[in-house]
Image: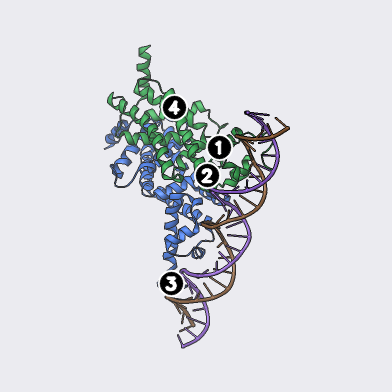
Chain colours: A blue, B green, C brown, D purple
Amino acid sequence: MARIAGSDGEVTRSEIRKVSLSLFAQFGYAAVSMRQIASQVGVQASAIYQYYPNKQQILVSLLQNHMDGLLSACHEEITAKDPVDRLEQFARFHIRYNINRPDEVFLSYMELRSLEPEGFATIADLRSKYEAVLKSILHDGIKSGVMKIDDPHVSAMAILAMLTGVNTWYRSGGRLSQKKIENMYASMVLKSQGIVPSDHDEKEAAHV
Amino acid sequence: MARIAGSDGEVTRSEIRKVSLSLFAQFGYAAVSMRQIASQVGVQASAIYQYYPNKQQILVSLLQNHMDGLLSACHEEITAKDPVDRLEQFARFHIRYNINRPDEVFLSYMELRSLEPEGFATIADLRSKYEAVLKSILHDGIKSGVMKIDDPHVSAMAILAMLTGVNTWYRSGGRLSQKKIENMYASMVLKSQGIVPSDHDEKEAAHV
DNA sequence: TAATTAAATGAACGTTCGTTAAATTAATAG
DNA sequence: CTATTAATTTAACGAACGTTCATTTAATTA
């Protein structure tokens, strides 16, 4: 047997991505074999090399894709002018975007160590661009005096860790809706940076 | 050659632990081979089996040891009565204990998935005991009305993620002292749960 | 000093790994 | 209908894997 009736390269390629993502997230990059991926795709291991030059490039491509999507979506969705509003938008965006992509997020945080230097540099650069978005919001909030922040870098790291942590416990169909979770995390993030919610809400109301 | 002059089982055992911890944390459990561990210990791979029955048990033992230490230290060091004081003690303890054990912490969070069912159950149970310590503090704080918390479980997860996240960026000898970092995280944790620091400080002062 | 125990070696086991190469069949283009 | 391109197979490569076993040497005990 060789080419299979009805086989389609684009379908196989996306199947390889889907399966690799799921297996890497579940067992870790190093623990997953090409044969294991191939078997779930329904193909022989050697067929994967038609689409990716090696195992490492599958991982790089998955991470690259995730970070690109994250960055462009965040630039699209965080539109407010006021720093407090922007921080709230950031928190809500981060939860909303990540909560439905648990495997990508897990990979992005856990498998950077599996990357060879070149791929690592690329992904690390994208991540620091994302962190810069948050840091810039915090700087604005400090300048305008609405946030009480000792150290913007530490605050940024604390906020990101807190938000990303939702993926360690959230399972869809659970007790809490995604909107509820988004609300709670947004509130905790704002308060953690010295923003008293009622203050800001009242100011907002006064404008209307 | 066989037994080496001056060789000592206890020294070799602890060397195996040290090396395994460092390699597992750096490359991931699955990516590290017995031969790699052995070579850093300065021994042949077969010698490791004098001390551990297999690779999996090295990991289980490292994780077990870490969680035991964490739990007993936390019970020793969190002594206050007042819920707000206890939450502050918890935050400071978690930072202080974890910041100097980056490899153990990383393993505990990342390699649970590498555990076979029995070991997984053991470690997961220890972790939930630790989480229960924090949740109990939050419940007390809610009952006494000093904390503004929507959902204690979500708050506990958020706090733990935020605190544990310090290990993703902290490197010893950096810009900030451990004490400074402890202070900042403790403050953010309290504020995130609706505790206004000055309020509590003033009440404390009033007692003196 | 002889017997025993502790600590390690070196060789080998069957398996699996990532990857390559040649062959084969399906779909498409001329 | 034929030639070409796309998609896949089977077979094989050397290397590395976790683990076992018999053996060897050092240290301790009797």
Q: Are marks 3 and 1 on the same chain?
A: no
Name the residue located 43 percent from the left edge and 72 percent from the top edge.
A4
Dot placed on the residue nearer the N-terminal end, 1 or 4: 1
Q: Residues within 10 Å of mark 2 (few under 14, many from 20)?
A: some
In the picture of the structure, the residue carrying the numbered disc 2 is B55
Q: Secondary structure at mark 2?
A: helix
For label 3, count other residues whose C-alpha is less than 10 Å away and answer few (under 14), some (14-19) or many (20+): few
Is residue D29 positioned above or below B63 on the image?
A: above
Q: Chain of mark 1?
A: B
From where the camera sits, is residue A189 visible?
no
Q: Could you tell me residue B90's position as x and y percent?
A: 41, 27
| Residue closer to the observer: A178 or B122 | B122
Look at mark 3 in the image and give the residue it sits on: A4
Q: Residues within 10 Å of mark 4 (few under 14, many from 20)?
A: few
Q: Position of residue A31 (x, y in %)?
A: 49, 51
- Kindly check if marks 3 and 1 are in contact, taking CB atoms under 8 A apart as contact: no
The disc labelled 1 sits on which kind of residue?
A: Arg
Disc 1: which residue: B17
Do tag 1 and tag 4 residues touch (Cβ < 8 Å)?
A: no
The nearer-to-camera label among 2 and 1 is 2
* Residue A144 pos. (x, y %): 41, 33
Residue under label 4, please give it: B72
